[in-house]
Amino acid sequence: MTSTASNDHPVPPSGTADGDGPAEAFRGEASDRDEAPQFVLPLVVRMERADPPARTDALETAARAVLVLLSDERATGDGEWAAAVRDWQDARIRKVVRRARGAEWRRAQALPGITVTGERAEVRVFPPVPLNGWPKELARLQVSGTELDDPRPAAAPDPDRPVLWLNPGLKMSAGKAMAQTGHGAQLAWWELSEAERTAWREAGFPLSVRVAETTAWRRLTHSGLPVVRDAGFTEIAPGKTVVAEGGSRYCPLPGGRP
């Protein structure tokens, strides 16, 4: 299955109390959130035919794009996107990644949103839209076909940076994995204090995305760190996909580092 549309329901870190906080939207079981109007966070990755980005670069850039939107003044308080963000977070937290090139990318750039760049990757994130109410410029973009590779093995992650660890037992398209790392970054963001969020934002949201070693995956998923659990609607069976681990300097997630 090639679709990368994400109807995933990440879960809060173990030990998080039940309540009305936004992490409740990431639980997999049915809740009142399923009865609310459903919204989706659109992300568009630029994929020019002759010069596609590297996979890890695209994943890291997508995760940062989610954080940039969440922290943007237009998405908070009385900002122009704040109501849409609240409606999105009151329902299931959905993210969908589409691809664009050439004129498609230029049309996407003309819509309200934020373009985030990595080493070479470019990802544009847009304020949430109704699940069945996409702008036509985005609705016509393809979800499938986001197959990307890394030209060389990724280096060990910087210990100062948080790491979004991918489940080593899963095979996901780049688009699907971009949605998953976006979920992981969002869970990490929710765990931080305002001072920690400010420090991370002012540093430019440094982070790494890596595939976990098979022997480390169980330890990571039982460490109390935020874990993303996929609902199994697209590409993969239900299960854990990403663990968000804090760095020693940025995004110091509480009580989770093994």
Image (spheres, grey):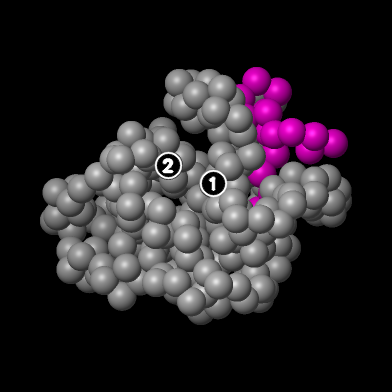
Question: Residue 175, how many percent across, how many down?
Answer: 45, 60
Q: Residue at x 36, y 39 (%)?
A: 77
Question: Residue 126, how many percent across, how many down?
Answer: 30, 51
Question: Residue 227, how many percent across, how many down?
Answer: 69, 53
Magenta segment boundaries in residue numbering? 241-258
Q: State which quarter of the image contains the C terminus.
A: top right
Q: Is residue 158 above or below residue 145?
A: above
Number of the label disc, if any, that sits on residue 70: 2
Q: Residue at x 41, y 70 (%)?
A: 38
Q: Is residue 253 above or below residue 52?
A: above
> CB atoms at circles 2 and 1 under 8 Å apart?
yes
Query: Is 200 on the left or on the right of 88, as rendered?
Result: right
Residue type at mark 1: give it: Gln
Q: Is residue 254 magenta?
A: yes
Q: Is residue 60 above or below residue 183?
A: above
Residue indicated by mark 1: 186
Q: Residue at x 14, y 49 (%)?
A: 110
Query: Is 164 on the left or on the right of 41, as rendered?
Result: right
| Cα–Cα gap, marks 2 and 1 | 8 Å
Query: Is 192 on the left or on the right of 77, as rendered?
Result: right
SS for dot 2: helix
Q: Of marks 2 and 1, which one's residue comes earlier in the chain? A: 2
Residue 138 or residue 175, whichever sits in front: 138
Q: Residue at x 58, y 42 (%)?
A: 190
SS for dot 1: helix
Q: Residues within 10 Å of mark 1 (few under 14, many from 20)?
A: many
Which quadrant of the view contains residue 116? top left
Which quadrant of the view contains residue 193? top right
Q: Is residue 83 magenta?
A: no
Report the magenta stretch's main SS: loop
Residue 86 or residue 170, whichever sits in front: 86
